[in-house]
């Protein structure tokens, strides 16, 4: 593929960069802008979003007729990376998880009528959403076949009973995608549904405390006790739940990589600015060979991650599933984000370890990257199976 960006995407990238510099980064400097969960307060986010919409920088991933910019996956890779130089940048442009992945899958599979009811409010920023799949106590994580939350058909409705946990953004979300078991078929036993937070028969049991900073709405445990969902709010066909998760998670895994690369670059920016000014034994830290090795190694890994991510994005734009490419990007970029944050803290010393910079925030956040949307070990298994099936064809060039 040609890694040069179309002129229209490059112009948007520069606009996004300027917006982050002028409107988002300054918000990080005022502790009064933050809530108890180390995220920007909802009113601060709302004001930031209004500025982004007024600037024409909104919902890069959505069709123009629904209010987005429809830049394609390659365009998303360039813009999401730029947006995520601040961890709060994706919020400004409505391309933050979990709404981002939910919008992408719902746009692909909903009818026009369903989009008006369920998708458009998320695109417009009027509601937040969540994707409820993972379960506690022997339930599904990386293996969806272990789902035990059940949906029983009763007339024209489905009745849901069970539990979910670590559901990102659930507290305060209005629209939910739910994966439930509808039969014991190993491949067609799951079905996906939509439900609204105002429906009775479910509750948020708790907001689970985590090591790192949280997305809005936290990571919650949910209980379902007779939630009734009309059959018209089923997604695709009965038994297509696994298909829905695959449609969502493919692109969602890659958009994580796009954002993580932006955060990794931010770590480099902070560390680079520090070592160019900090003196040690008569020279700046930047003139020390050991420091140069550290910075150069991270720069190399970020660049590799960008190439892996952009190649996968290009293949998605061509209609390919890009499963191996997405897994490779996910593994490498998750490792790179942690390495970038760790290296930047080491170079900045006590200042990096303190809350005077964003580095310790990114460091704690980075640890989840090797877990979310499939642990790194699962993606290595995917790559191993692909290689054993294809042998040397695994390394073929596209023609």
Image (tube, grey):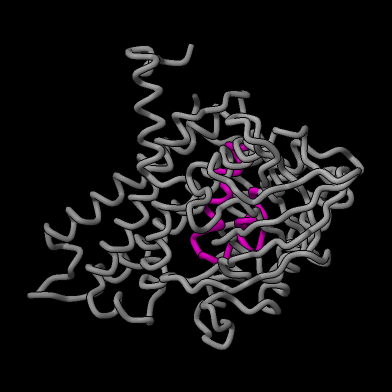
| In-front residue for pair 122/48 | 122
Residue 72 visible within the image: no
- Is 266 placed left or right of 110 in the picture? left
Quarter of the image for residue 113 reads top right
Which percent across, then down, holds residue 187? 60, 29
Residue 357 visible within the image: yes
Q: Is residue 141 above or below residue 351?
A: above
At horizontal 60% and vertical 51% (from top left) the residue drawn is 133
Q: Is residue 73 above or below residue 289?
A: above
Quarter of the image for residue 376 reads top left
- Is 73 placed left or right of 360 in the picture? right
Which percent across, then down, holds residue 385? 38, 24
At horizontal 30% and vertical 75% (from top left) the residue drawn is 352
Which percent across, then down, holds residue 14? 58, 52
- Is 92 placed left or right of 28 in the picture? right
Q: Magenta region: which residues? A: 72-101
Which percent across, then down, holds residue 118? 83, 52
């Amino acid at each position: 593929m040609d890694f040069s960006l179309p002129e229209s995407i490059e112009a948007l990238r520069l606009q996004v960069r300027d917006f982050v510099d002028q409107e988002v980064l300054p918000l990080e400097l005022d502790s009064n802008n933050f809530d108890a969960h180390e995220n920007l307060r909802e009113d601060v986010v709302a004001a930031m979003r209004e500025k982004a919409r007024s600037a024409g920088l909104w919902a890069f991933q959505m069709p123009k007729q629904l209010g987005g910019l429809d830049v394609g996956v390659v365009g998303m890779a360039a813009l999401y990376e730029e947006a995520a130089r601040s961890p709060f940048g994706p919020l400004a442009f409505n391309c933050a998880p979990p709404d981002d992945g939910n919008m992408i899958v719902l746009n692909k599979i909903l009818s026009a009528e369903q989009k008006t009811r369920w998708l458009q409010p998320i695109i417009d920023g009027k509601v937040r959403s969540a994707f409820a799949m993972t379960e506690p106590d022997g339930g599904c994580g990386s293996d969806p076949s272990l789902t035990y939350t059940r949906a029983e058909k009763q007339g024209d409705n489905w009745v849901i009973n069970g539990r979910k946990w670590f559901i990102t953004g659930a507290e305060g979300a209005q629209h939910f995608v739910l994966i439930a078991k509808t039969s014991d078929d190993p491949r067609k036993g799951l079905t996906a549904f939509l439900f609204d937070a105002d429906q009775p028969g479910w509750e948020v049991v708790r907001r689970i405390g985590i090591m790192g900073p949280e997305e809005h709405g936290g990571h919650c445990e949910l209980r379902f006790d007779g939630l009734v969902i009309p059959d018209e709010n089923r997604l695709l066909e009965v038994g297509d739940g696994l298909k829905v998760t695959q449609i969502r998670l493919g692109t969602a895994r890659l958009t994580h990589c796009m954002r993580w690369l932006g955060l990794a670059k931010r770590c480099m920016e902070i560390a680079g600015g520090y070592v160019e000014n900090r003196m040690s034994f008569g020279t700046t830290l930047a003139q020390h060979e050991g420091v140069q090795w550290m910075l150069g190694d991270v720069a190399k890994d970020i660049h590799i991650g960008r190439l892996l991510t952009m190649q996968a994005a290009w293949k998605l734009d061509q209609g390919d599933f890009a499963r191996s490419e997405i897994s490779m990007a996910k593994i490498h970029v998750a490792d790179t984000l942690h390495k970038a944050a760790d290296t930047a803290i080491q170079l900045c010393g006590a200042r990096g370890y303190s809350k005077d910079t964003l580095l310790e925030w990114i460091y704690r956040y980075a640890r989840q990257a090797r877990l979310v949307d499939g642990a790194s070990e699962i993606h290595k298994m995917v790559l191993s199976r692909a290689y054993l099936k294809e042998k040397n064809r695994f390394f073929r060039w596209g023609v």
